[in-house]
Image (cartoon, rainbow, N blue to C red):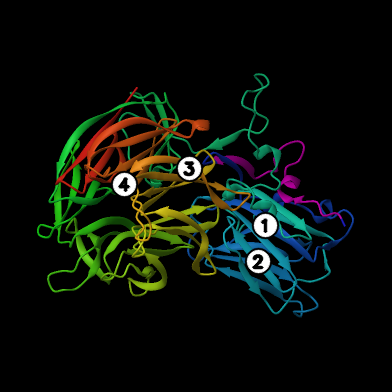
Amino acid sequence: TDLRPLDILSEVVSAGGLAHGMRVFQAQGVRGFQLAASRPRALGFLASRLFIHCDCFPEEFSIIITLRVPSVPAKRNEYIFTLMAEESPSVLVGLRYAPDKLHFLFWSQEHAGGWQTRVTFPNVSLSDSQWHTLVLAVSGQSFSLTVDCSVPKDVVVETPFPASLSVKRAAFYLGNRRRRKGVFTGLLRQLVLLPGADATPQICTAMSLKVATLSVPSVLQDLPAKPVSNEVLKYPYETDTKVTLGSRPPCTKQEKAQFWFNASRRGLYLCNGSTWISMLEVKQRLDYVEEYQNLVTNSETMGVEVFTIPKVGLFAATANRYTPPGSAIYKWTDGKFVPYQNIPTYQAQSWKYFTIGKKIFLAVANFEQNDRGQEFSVIYKWSHRKEKFVAYQRLTTHSARDWEAFVIGGEAFLAVVNHREGNNHNIDSVIYRWNPKTGLFETNQTIPTSGAYDWEFFTIGPYSFLAVANTFNGTSTKIYSHIYIWLSGSFQLFQSILTFGAADWEVFRVGDRVFLAVANSHSYDSGMPAPSNFYAINSSIYELNVTAQMFVKFQDLLTYSALDWEFFSVGDDSFLVVANSFDGFTFSVNSIIYRWQGYEGFVAAHHLPTVGCRDWEAFHTAEGSYLLYSSAKEPLSKVLKLKTT
């Protein structure tokens, strides 16, 4: 049996050029075929061109499709392809989609009395004008669909796919069922039939999962960087490109795939639907850091969160120690942060900004009880009418230190770090799941932690991870912090790493490499002799070893009661800044910016005077790039501006 990939798209592209009704269109830098509905029969070819040695459709196979689908009306169905017998309206094999559904069709004379069988995959969202790669694997009664290498959707039906489906005098039709109605209106890049195998392992090794390739027609492949001569393109292609000049325009879904040329920076930027991505510019380099703004806060600040509310502006929320007056939210106005809103908090430790659909939330981690002796943390919701955050949901917590918000498989989660309950540091931290029916967060899973300070969520390919920074177990800070992986609907232990009073995890990428940095705050063990300095200890950077499937130590950096890491970039350069808070003698300690130096790792580049530094946030505006640090020892935080050359 010939088990080579059968490229259906390539069969429609003849040696002389494209079939009538086809044109090449480029979207988001990727090319695909756009099909016209005027002559659907022109987009077909005899099945015998694919099935040379056998006139039966394979019993087991995979179909690989890469497509881009615009928004589809609610009641519309569109065909990706069909296999139809001549002079018969019946679809022998076909694939069509409707909003949020994908239907696989096949004809089985023996098992279904000559009726068509439809296998439906619900909750398949393709109509978002993004590229997606689908792998449909068929074997007997089992049908499996994988979208962008995520978790497969499996369906078992009563009627198996036929063992001997004749393709005599049958023809493939691209994007239609031989009629104008239901013609595919998106872009098709890949349509491959692979007999006898599940193609998922072959496809899901690509770096860009949404445009993973098994076989693509040459006309859709990238052109050479330099043309061979001044020849005209054999296959001209169209692209929906627009370039805007002048000051920074808005970047929303409406401007997606459009360009903006910044004359002052000599830079060309591409809108990805939310932010402008640099495509070509004179790369900036960090020269030095200057003090930009002294931000007077309500009291000492344990943490700070910088965020942008679309069409409203840039904000910073400070987690302040004392109540009253509580914590504050500042708005970036005329190049400075100015007070915007006060919120009652109880020894607040941190804020977390997140969105669910169009809803905007801000969660605070309260460390102490309120005036009534109640201990809870609060989720606030942005009121578009009041243009303020208002209390939305209270959740019982125990000396909460941190919130982490994330999405897995389209579901929203919120995880809280519980530090201690009374004098007991070995307690559960909680992961909540958003219930869209009630509009509330509900307990989904509890994870044992030890005096924990921080959660860090990150993804690698299709896998989701959650790392916890365990700080103190009641007798020692020399304890294991853990990394969990999401499997079968819950987080399960993936790896344990020995840490010393871990206060923060920071995940970041340099090129294709994935790193995880831990901030170690102090070394204490009641059963061991006291070290010369509890606070001058190494914090460590770990790198993902794909072969070993674990994080391995990459570099140690001497820190002084480190409480936070923040990763940021300037031009092509990558940086890490550490929050050094106490050296054993004074809280006036230099925090350090480290520059990525390739083989040397991270090398100290700038020493920044700070006082009880607790948290760093990097942010950008149209005027430039900044760092904001919070002080846990004085009611004064600072905004620093990154000066570039």
Dot 2 lies on which element? Answer: strand
User: What residue occupies the far left of the structure in this picture?
Assistant: 324
Image quarter (top left, top right, bottom left or bottom right) of the C terminus: top left
Q: Position of residue 344 (x, y in %)?
A: 15, 61
**Residue 610 is covered by the magenta coloring:** no
Give the residue pinned by disc 1. 200
Please tell me whether mark 2 or mark 4 is closer to you in this view.
Answer: 4
Characterize the local packing of mark 3: few (<14), some (14-19) or many (20 or more) Cα atoms within 10 angstroms.
few
Dot 1 lies on which element? Answer: helix
Per the model, the C-alpha gap separating discs 3 and 4 is 25 Å
Dot 3 lies on which element? Answer: strand
Give the residue pinned by disc 4. 561
Give the residue pinned by disc 2. 144
Above or below residue 151? Residue 329 is above
Image quarter of residue 376: bottom left
Characterize the local packing of mark 4: few (<14), some (14-19) or many (20 or more) Cα atoms within 10 angstroms.
many
Dot 4 lies on which element? Answer: loop
The disc labelled 2 sits on which kind of residue?
Answer: Ser
The disc labelled 3 sits on which kind of residue?
Answer: Arg
Give the residue pinned by disc 3. 509
Which mark sits nearer the N-terminus, 4 or 1? 1
